[in-house]
Amino acid sequence: MSLMTRVLAPITSNRPAQFVLERTVKQCLQLMGVGSGTDAWSSGERTMIEGVLAQTSATTPCFFDVGANKGQFLSLLLSVLGNRAATIHSFEPSSEAFSHLQSVARRDERVRINNTALGSCSGTATLFADQPGSGMGSLTKRSLGYRKLTFDHEESVEVTTLDEYCESHGVAQINLLKMDVEGHELNVLEGARRMLSENAIGAITFEFGGCNIDTRTYFQDFFFYLTDAKMQVYRISPGGYACPVRQYREIYEQFRTTNFLATRAA
């Protein structure tokens, strides 16, 4: 026990003090990006995209938007790109969400949309959601009864792998792979082994949070998978600062929506 803890323990051993401590910790975590990753427009992702663009020498950078939902990240990406040349491949398995995605994508010929999920292997799967087109739709039936949510809506969806898609569509390089697939991000990475081994993915951004409780995946899994692929992991703050995560610690297992970035290690 540290000296500070020994000094403060007696005066914080009461309900009001614990309430203040909990609120303070929560606010500090949010400023670190922990719990601040749900909204693409305010989570620091814009600055992250700008940073990726600044680092690439590609005249036509390639983006993968995996788990596009209704086009929230796509709209942000198009806003950052402006008139710059690019190729964007968006993936959304929900038929309801896909119809909304179409309305965003049809305005821009740089975007190719796919009504499918990406995973560790090809086939079909069941998409579970609390309502059609929900941004919480997952290939795992989540247990959120404590939030008065039931995942009773089911839809059969097609699944392919990132490697298979890239091979069949002639994609040789991905400048940014964005994943928001409600707890199945690791499955997407497992289906991208070839592209990762060939150093064909420049940067990866993904969410980690409550969904990973239901899929039983941990930050440890992501950290070692990505560092084994020779990538450096960063946590994205709401202001867009990419804070390096240089080694794994148990404290990073924070199941509140947080955005992370991984780039090719120098």
Image (cartoon, rainbow, N blue to C red):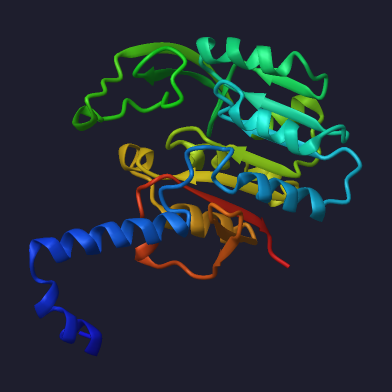
Q: Is residue 94 left or right of residue 142?
A: right
Residue 186 drawn at (x, y percent): 49, 42
In percent of the image, x 79 and y 33: which residue is there?
171
In percent of the image, x 42 and y 37: which residue is there?
183
Residue 235 drawn at (x, y percent): 53, 57
Residue at far bottom of view: 3
Q: Is residue 17 left or right of residue 28?
A: left
Residue 27 drawn at (x, y percent): 37, 57
Q: Within the image, what quadrant is residue 257 found in?
A: top left
Residue 237 drawn at (x, y percent): 53, 56
Residue at far right of view: 59
Q: Nearer the viewer, residue 76 or 98?
A: 76
Q: Tell me the quarter of the image containing the C terminus.
A: bottom right
Q: Nearer the viewer, residue 197 or 148?
A: 148
In percent of the image, x 41 and y 17: which residue is there?
126
In percent of the image, x 58 and y 37: which residue is there?
191
Q: Is residue 57 above or below residue 79?
A: below
Residue 82 in sight here: yes
Residue 253 in sight here: no
Q: Nearer the viewer, residue 80 or 67?
A: 80
Q: Is residue 179 above or below residue 164?
A: below
Q: Tell me the quarter of the image containing the N terminus.
A: bottom left
Q: Is residue 189 left or right of residue 23?
A: right
Q: Is residue 241 above or below residue 185?
A: below
Q: Nearer the viewer, residue 148 or 126?
A: 148
Q: Within the image, what quadrant is residue 219 found in?
A: bottom left
Question: How many numbered discs sit on the rendered protein?
Answer: 0
